[in-house]
Amino acid sequence: MKGSQKTERQGGRKRINLALQGGGAHGAFTWGVLDRLIRDTRIYIDGLSGTSAGAINATVFAHGFIKGGRKGACDALAAFWEAVSDHTSKVPGQEFARMFSPAEDRWNVDSSPAFMMADYLSRMFSPYQLNPMDYNPLRDILTAQVDFAALRRRKEIKLFVAATNVRTCKLRVFTTEEMHVECLLASACLPLTFRAVEFQGEHYWDGGYLANPPISPLIHECVSKDVVIVQINPMNRSDVPTSSREILNRINEISFNATLAREMSGIATISKLIEDGKLQDTPFHKVNFHMIIAEEEMSHLGASSKFNADWDFLRYLYDLGVSTTEKWLEEHYDHIERETTLDLVKTYI
């Protein structure tokens, strides 16, 4: 991996970079991860990259940290997710749907009449027809809660937000000094739900189509040599999907893991060359990779639950993120700045 800066301790703490996947309401899992990490004073977060919900989590986290340090970051994330739940409320018909769902399926909203109607309409009409005023509740929440002007002035905060250029099919990674609310809306823009987001004369869709999340900026532009991937889309499943809903769920997971798998497979190849001593006297250096994931629990959640902003569901994901991170710290804290704990070949190749 390329880079010129050497790892430096920040007040004796261990530095890490965070790569935060997107996944709608499932981003509440990442809220729990961030909350637990920032409360550990042994950890210093050097840079954050994210896509969609991951990008929003990263930006809200950074804004809160600027205002109030570690506690400010925790408070800002909690306020954001509470606002999301308040604005979207419970999916209409969700309680009715739960009556006929098995316990392990209680958070999915496939059986919700409102979800089924919205899904049907999105396949018949575009958001340019269904939402001519381009209303997006996230715009109001983010504008009210994040001081983007103050954030842009803090160039030492390393944020990298991915979006997909609709016209060129190229990845755009927004950095801290250019961060606006439109950058986050672009990163989280689902094409069948929202109109393409215009920013600086270009139009963007969800960044997950090209990077979920982007890894390279953390390697090339941050001091830390440790990258922690917060994975919310399951990579592995024990069974082959057979029902139409299972197939659609798996397509969703594969689609939003594909770009990460592609980027990491290339990184795995370079890492192997570094380990074998074949890239000596080059700009490439060793990077340690780690992953925080609750694959078993998240695999029970279908794609429809990404639209579920029920507060009980968000709190379930938050608690899962906290407990998963607690376990990860117990097992892997000592490995930070020493060695990789993620088998790149086994995971991505």
Image (tube, helix red, strand yellow):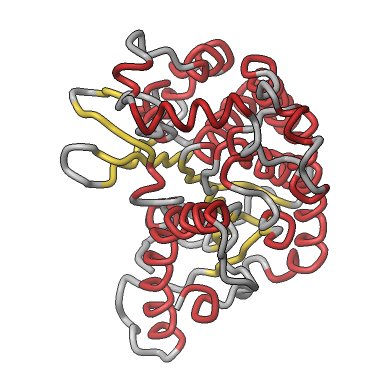
Residue 339 percent across, percent down from the top left: 62, 75
**Residue found 48% across the figure and 52% down from its top:** 252
**Residue found 56% across the figure and 64% down from its top:** 242
**Above or below, comparing residue 113 to residue 163 in the picture:** above
Residue 147 percent across, percent down from the top left: 51, 16
Quarter of the image that includes the N terminus: bottom left
**Above or below, comparing residue 146 to residue 23 in the picture:** above
Residue 41 visible in the current orientation: no
Q: How many marks?
A: 0
**Above or below, comparing residue 277 to residue 297 in the picture:** below
Residue 129 visible in the current orientation: yes
Quarter of the image that includes the C terminus: bottom left
Which image quadrant is residue 69 in? top right
Residue 158 percent across, percent down from the top left: 47, 40
Compared across the picture, whether 318 is left or right of 57 comes to: right
**Residue found 67% across the figure and 59% down from its top:** 293
Nearest the viewer among 220 and 256 is: 256
Which image quadrant is residue 61 in? top right
